[in-house]
Amino acid sequence: MSQPATMTANGNIHWKRNLFVCFAGSFTTIVAMTLLLPFLPLYIHQLGVQDNAAIARWSGVAYGATFFSAALTAPLWGKLADRYGRKLMLIRASLGMSIAMSLIGMATAPWQLVALRLLAGLLGGYASGSTIMVAAQTPKEQTGWALGVLSAGIMAGNVVGPLIGGVLPPLIGIRQTFWLIGGVIFLAFLATTFLLKEAPRPAGGKKAVAATAGEEKVNRPVVAMMWLSGMLLIFANMSIEPIITLYVGQFVQGDHQITLTAGLVMSAAALGSILSAPRLGRLADRIGHWKVLTGGLACCAVLLIPQAFITAAWQLVALRFLMGMALGGLLPCVTAIIRHNVPEGQVGRMLGYSTSAQYIGQVTGPLFGGFIGGSIGMRTVFLTTCGVMAIGAVLNSWQARRQRTIQS
């Protein structure tokens, strides 16, 4: 029988095994949250909605429902993870998602689909829970790299999910696709239950955790800056989503070519982030998380300028790939900085709020891009987002200098 995990000065001795389990579980649950995007309108049509405008409305509500409820509950699950154990929250999330996805395949009306998508967000949160687990129990000198690896798995799920959603339903059917992914997530539940090893809770349980948290204070200015930075990162990545197809249509002819190129543009940033996240995380462990975060924000701001003045679609693909590489390691840096500036007993709650802030960026980014692009012009979206990212770089540089002054 394996020995229980223990915490040493360098973190949980099973942190690498935990990272592998969290990577696999986060990947599968993110795939589950995103795979219905290509066939969502078809499923709503199967559920009895005939009018195209109504299908579009139900599709938007159903897709956004999961992220809405996940944003609301992330701080709660983080707080409960601090109090009752991070592994327990991952078991809850994986089992809850497995059940919710299977039930979605049994929906008979669009309101049931929306309700079950809300339930999936409410019961889910595996990726954010994994982030808390990895951040809390990885040796501090390896935190950036480990979070970069986990971030790569999460972003890979965002890429692979829609691809699977485009391939599986024609082969096995829409309902069967949900049941299959529910079964895959159940395997993640089993792996989490039997393979993941959490270090024992402090003696005295939740009272000891509360006492430990009371002895240290949250570095609130730093943590608030990281919440803002995380929101800005997602905001910048999502701001052009509503206008990509229209923008690409200025340089490419034919509906098929426009759709294909727009897909490449969307995937390019994610691919760049997947490739760069572990490397930037390791670099941050070596030279400092603040330096990588500030530099990445500045690079992102610079790369947004030529995107507004492209003359061919391939240039946008290349620039979005480079931007994805610049963004790849930044969310792990945000998480690592939060981890290093809060007491052990409040890591989950603070990272839960960080997750909620990122969901705000996921919602406001497309709204901002659609409004500015439709009112002023699509090039303005890139330039305005550039200004937002530049402000973020300046604020982080100022906060980093302030921290060095306080510590000296």
Image (cartoon, rainbow, N blue to C red):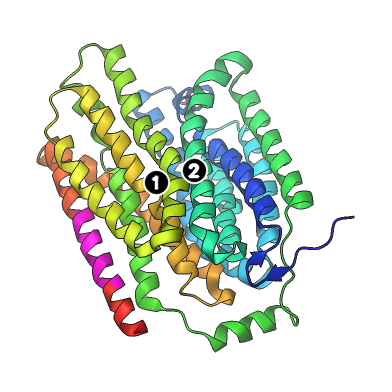
> Which quarter of the figure is the C terminus placed in?
bottom left
The residue where tag 1 is placed is: 328
Compared to residue 139, the image places residue 203 above or below, namely below
> Which quarter of the figure is the N terminus placed in?
bottom right
Q: Position of residue 392 (x, y in %)?
A: 25, 60
For badge 2, the amino acid type reads: Ala
Local secondary structure at mark 1: helix
Q: Which residues are magenta?
A: 388-400
* Label 2 close to label 1 by CB (< 8 Å): yes
The residue under the point 31% across, 19% down is 259
**Is most of the magenta stretch helix, strand or loop?**
helix
Asked if residue 119 lies in the magenta stretch, the reply is: no
Tell me if 21 is positioned left or right of 73 in this view: right
Compared to residue 336, the image places residue 44 above or below, namely above
Label 2 vs 1, first from the N-terminus: 2
Q: Which mark is residue 343?
A: none
For badge 1, the amino acid type reads: Gly
Near-viewer residue (250 or 170): 250
Residue 356 seen:
no
The residue where tag 2 is placed is: 152
Tell me if 112 is positioned left or right of 231 in this view: right
The answer to which image quadrant residue 320 occupies is: top left
Q: Position of residue 102 (x, y in %)?
A: 67, 36
Compared to residue 404, the image places residue 93 above or below, namely above
The answer to which image quadrant residue 201 occupies is: bottom right
The residue under the point 24% across, 49% down is 299
Local secondary structure at mark 2: helix
Asked if residue 398 lies in the magenta stretch, the reply is: yes
Marks 2/1: CA–CA distance? 8 Å
